[in-house]
Amino acid sequence: MNALVIETRGLRKEFSSRRGGLRVAVDDLDLAVPAGGVHGFLGPNGSGKTTTIRMLLGLARATAGSMRLFGTEVPGRLPEVAERVGAVVESPKFAPHFTGHQNLTLLARTIGAGSDRVDAALETVRLTGRERDRYKAYSLGMKQRLAIAATLLKDPDLLILDEPTNGLDPAGIREIRDTIRDLGASGVTVLLSSHILAEVQQVCTSATIIGNGRMLASGTVEDLLSTSGTTYRVRVADPAAAHRHLEAAGFTVSVGDHGLVIEGSRPPQDITRTLAEQGLWLAELTPIRVDLETFFLDLTRDETLGASR
């Protein structure tokens, strides 16, 4: 099993409410991020994602619990591992009249990185060919990729990205998605905080889902989706009769856009047998794979939001 790059135990963060009393933003959170690949940190807006990240980076103080990066306790020993961590948490500040290359070169000098790191970072985020353009002429997607490039100057082992596609158009989202996928494949561990599930599923190898500051589910994406049961789409010549007989046999049946939808854990041969015994022959029996967004919405449907992010 891979070593854990990020680990929290019983992590809690409370804020004083304007009306008096306390608001709990993060509630007894156990987070485990293995080394390598892209780990989705998923939750609705207001679920505690950004608060958790700020605590990991020493930007906010935890009320209770413990945190470790690369097995090192933080924030007490954060300086020991800070060079191994890159993060894009807020909108970066770059000189608008400088080119992308000039902006990164200035940053590289402040941390003692060579010009080769600038070129490598620009290539990784796919800005080669546009690095001589002024920053103010960049699209939002290009600006976000330059922010990621800035974190890569010190060649981090862990990259933390907080909602990196917010405000981007579809082209910009695709650019960031491709960049994140490449980083995960290169050996960098990426913690990707997001609420855009359709995009996350395309890049994440594992995920943690939180709601109202509490962990709701965690594991590989494949394992998470496999726990949601199996759904089948069925088409027959007489759907009304099929609906009636399947329900009588104990199946959960609903009417979908392209046929009947059957949910449950019973094997597909039971569906076939039930219908055949009534002289109803299948035109289609297709398993419907639940996507991460559907799983997420089902999991968080009953969560009451309102805690500070």
Image: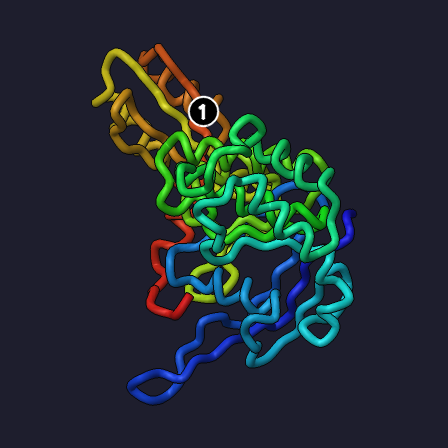
* Image height of 67 relative to 190, above or below: below
Q: Is residue 173 left or right of residue 101?
A: left
Label 1 SS:
strand
Q: Residue at x 55, y 81 (%)?
A: 63
- Would you identify the image quadrant in which residue 178 lies? top right
Q: Residue at x 55, y 32 (%)?
A: 127
Q: Residue furthest bottom?
A: 20
Tell me which residue sits at (53%, 47%) in the image: 147
- Residue 29, located in which quarter of the rendered image? bottom right
Question: Which sits in the foreground, 124 or 56?
Answer: 124
Q: Residue furthest front?
A: 97
Instruction: Tell me the quarter of the image containing the C terminus.
Output: bottom left
Q: Is residue 6 above or below residue 308?
A: above
Task: Give amino acid for label 1.
Answer: Pro
Please give the residue where the numbered disc 1 appears in the rendered image.
Answer: 287
Number of numbered discs visible in the structure rendering:
1
Q: Position of residue 136 (x, y in %)?
A: 41, 42
Task: Report whether residue 265 is seen.
Answer: no
